[in-house]
Image: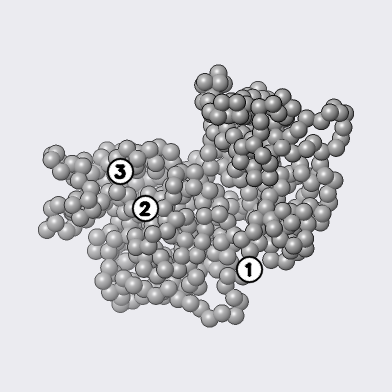
Amino acid sequence: MQFFAKNQMDTIRRTRYAGSWYDNNPTALSKEMDGYLGKAKTQPDSDSNERLKVTSDPITGDVLAVIVPHAGFMFSGQTAAFAYKAAKHERIKRVFVLGPSHHVGMRGAGLPQATKFATPVGDLEVDTEQVEALLTYPLFSTQSDAHAVEHSLELQMPFIKHVFGDVKIVPIIIGQLDDPSEARVIGEVLKGFVGVNDLVAVSSDFTHYGPRYQYTPFVYLEDIPGRIGKLDGEAFQHLSKVDLDGFAHFLKCTDDTICGQFPCEVLMAMLPKGVHGTLLKYATSAEIATDDTQNSVSYLAVAFSGAQWPEQPGAVRPASEVVKLSQEERQTLLRLARETMENFVRFKKVKTPEALNIQITDAMKECFGVFVTLMKKSSDPNSTEPKDLRGCIGSIYPNKPLYQGVQENAVAACSRDYRFRPVAGEELADLDVELSILTPPRRIASYNEIVVGRDGVILSKNRHQALFLPHVATEWGWDLEQMLTQLSLKAGLGPNDWHEGAKFDVFQAEKVE
């Protein structure tokens, strides 16, 4: 299914806030942004760090991503300029712009139908091929109504056009996410497409304090600006360390009103290891609107550096390079799967690893996709025929610590595989348990790139999807065409529907048995 017809006229997302939140005169707006950029610096701001009681490491190398505020330019334009000045580089050809939804309730990641976004200083072209590709993934959908009224993205477009010129954009509204695991799914999908010529710009304001925002935890205390700064400082510390779980826990404990919470979580799920955040500027609306002593909105400019986006986005690495587990750790995970399943089947309870007397190592806390497969034991130990399947369920994306995924999918494989009745206690002794630990799925250009036996494959077409683990084709003796025919049928499609219009993601797996 092609979302953007090749011969369709451009559809433009018109400005909604030009003339009110920022100047709609091209000359005046360009002059205003030049003024902001002229005052901006590209290294840690000592005053901002002191106000937030944080330390901030300098930018090292290229800036991969920025967090930028989205209030009216009179309030946050100067702060935003710090981030965009730090990110400016001739290598940048495309900007992924992530922002929250303020006006339309939605879940997941919302994509536009527009092919261009207008700004007073010139239109920006949407990377429609990228949008089409993202629409084939879970949690991504079209959200035209949300895009039409959303200011968090619009406020970034003039700066992007002014600083980077004729780059393409991928505008994404991040709506409600149930927990950090969904942020990891969206982040992992986006990570498969982001490369060295890309910048990620996350649009977020920080603490919204006061009766206007129904957030007054310090109303009867002294030094409210200092207390707001402490909140913003704690949030920044988690962001600077790319600590997604810590950031989510902080928000749960404080209810801090960071409107871009979910885009920030997705960013942390995207960033490669070794990245750190640099605080470039901190300001609040209370410093500008001095007549409003009751309400305050915080603005941070943060730049992320210390590593690089890949030269080749979406490159698939062998499982042996990704899954760093000792043989003892592999067998421990296998034992965890079996004992979790047995306890659930017998007692309908899921015991913690501690209760099972199983020690979880740091390597087992790394996030991976994992499948748990239950097979009936063969009566002939020398048989080369495939064993009879008794249940198989897993997580494709690395959205949870590995040991948690093993336990959750062990329970699901024995009780919620729709193809089979739940496993009974008398069957347990006759079942073998296998684990498949997955590398992140990555999109390929053609099914001809698939290597049978090496690659697991996900086929997607017209909202239909199916998956085979790498060893399935080998065990059944299928060649590429036979495997894709079977995969197409598994997805509820015709046997030949994989030939045209289907998208393919591949991954590799470390099998533990």
Q: According to the image, label 2 marks what residue?
A: 260
- Marks counted in the figure total 3
**Residue located at (69% from left, 62% from top):** 502
Distance, label 1 to label 2, CA atoms, is: 32 Å
Disc 3: which residue: 255
83 vs 414, nearest the viewer: 414
Q: Quadrant of the C terminus?
A: top right
Q: Quadrant of residue 100?
A: bottom left
Circle 2 residues within 10 Å: few <14, some 14–19, many ≥20 = many
Q: Which of marks 3 and 1 is nearer the N terminus?
A: 1
Marks 3 and 2: CB-CB under 8 Å?
no
Give the CA separation, mark 3 to mark 2.
13 Å
The local secondary structure at tag 3 comes to loop
Residue 1: which numbered mark, if any?
1
Label 2 amino acid? Answer: Gly
**SS at badge 2:** loop
Q: Which of marks 3 and 2 is nearer the N terminus?
A: 3
First in sequence, mark 1 or 2: give its number. 1
Residue at horizontal 64%, vertical 42%?
417
Q: Work out whether residue 491 or residue 301 is closer to the camera in this orientation and state it.
A: 491
Few, some or many C-alpha atoms within 10 Å of disc 1 (few <14, some 14-19, many ≥20)?
few
Q: Position of residue 210 (x, y in %)?
A: 19, 50
* Rendered location of residue 394, percent (x, y): 62, 41
Query: Which quadrant, please, contains the N terminus?
Result: bottom right
* Mark 1 vs mark 2: in front: 1
Q: CB under 8 Å between callouts 1 and 2?
A: no
Q: Residue 175: x, y in percent? A: 42, 56
Q: Is residue 45 above or below residue 464?
A: above
Task: Please give left or right for residue 109 compared with residue 368 in the image.
Answer: left
Q: Can residue 510 be spotted in the picture? A: no
For the point 77% across and 63% down, which residue is it? 496
